[in-house]
């Protein structure tokens, strides 16, 4: 068995780079070898996907999605089985004025039915134009739009993979390289506190918007 790591790539302020890396677990199995042409097709389709309005509103006008990379990896040892990269036909920018530092992010927490750290994941989305209130927390409507639009984006990525490999099907998952498992996501949560990419500040209380998945 294997899994697919999807890397969405972009730039911040034209000088820094960012990426988000959701994992999708095939409901079936690739044939004896992964079709490179099908993988290339999926990579290009994902690179050219529209980014929903709520995500673009948070990105900031100087934040750009530039492309994607797909890695098919083995369940047993996470070794790389196949790779494809694609550049977006047109770079997708955020839609509102940049007002926060480059590493500012909103965090999407991925929850599965597997207890412990191996059943939880996070995605950090650039949030250089998030709107905060008097307490320094992100506007509730913006967080709600972010959570629901991210669900749409992830669903569309899933659909692009399925279109390229119609005999398989895919589920959003959290990959644990410690246990070599990929439990499936059952809900996603978006917090209302600005975070710094790759660094969590769990001591800051925050409220959550939760949507079911899929």
Image: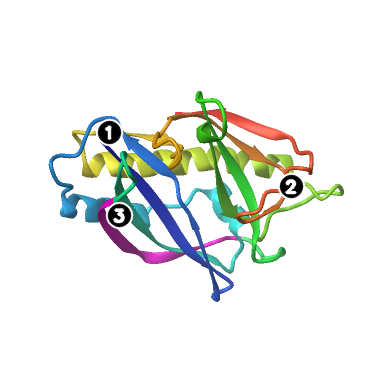
- Report the side of 71 relative to 134 (left or right): left
- The residue that disc 2 covers is 138
Q: Could you say whether the residue bearing mark 1 is in a helix, strand or loop? A: loop
Q: Give the range drawn in magenta.
A: 80-95
Q: Which mark is residue 122?
A: none
Q: Earlier in the sequence, mark 1 or mark 2?
A: 2
- Magenta: main secondary structure equals strand
- The residue that disc 3 covers is 43
Kindly check if marks 1 and 2 are in contact, taking CB atoms under 8 A apart as contact.
no
Tell me if residue 198 is in the magenta stretch. no
Q: Could you say whether the residue bearing mark 2 is in a helix, strand or loop? A: loop
Indicate which label's residue lies in the foreground, 3 or 2.
3
Gap between marks 3 and 2, in whole Å?
32 Å
Gap between marks 1 and 2, in whole Å?
35 Å
Residue drawn at point x = 37 percent, y = 40 percent: 24
Residue drawn at point x = 23 percent, y = 56 percent: 40
Report the quarter where the N terminus lies: top left
Gap between marks 3 and 1, in whole Å?
16 Å
- Report the side of 165 relative to 111 (left or right): left
Q: What is the x, y in percent for residue 160?
A: 31, 44
Q: Could you say whether the residue bearing mark 3 is in a helix, strand or loop? A: helix
Disc 1 packing (10 Å; few <14; some 14–19; many ≥20) = some
Up the image or down, 128 lies above or below 189; here it is below
Up the image or down, 110 lies above or below 13; here it is above
Asked which quadrant contains residue 178, the reply is: top left
Q: Residue 169 carries which label?
A: 1
């Amino acid at each position: 068995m294997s899994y697919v790591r999807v890397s969405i790539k972009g730039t911040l302020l034209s000088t820094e780079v960012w990426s988000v890396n959701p994992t999708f677990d095939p409901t079936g199995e690739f044939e004896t070898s992964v079709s490179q042409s099908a993988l290339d097709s999926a990579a290009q389709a994902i690179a050219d996907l529209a980014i929903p309005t709520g995500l673009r509103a948070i990105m900031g006008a100087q934040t750009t999605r530039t492309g994607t990379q797909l890695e098919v990896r083995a369940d047993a040892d996470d070794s790389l089985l196949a790779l494809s990269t694609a550049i977006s036909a047109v770079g997708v920018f955020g839609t509102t004025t940049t007002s926060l530092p480059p590493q500012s992010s909103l965090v999407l927490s991925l929850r599965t039915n597997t207890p412990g750290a191996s059943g939880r994941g996070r995605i950090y989305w650039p949030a250089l134009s998030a709107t905060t209130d008097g307490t320094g927390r992100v506007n509730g409507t913006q967080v709600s739009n972010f959570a629901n639009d991210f669900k749409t984006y992830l669903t569309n990525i899933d659909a692009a993979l399925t279109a390229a490999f119609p005999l398989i099907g895919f589920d959003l998952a959290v990959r644990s390289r410690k246990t070599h498992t990929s439990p499936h996501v059952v809900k996603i949560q978006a917090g209302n506190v600005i975070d710094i990419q790759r660094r969590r500040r769990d001591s800051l209380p925050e409220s959550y918007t939760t949507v079911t998945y899929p």
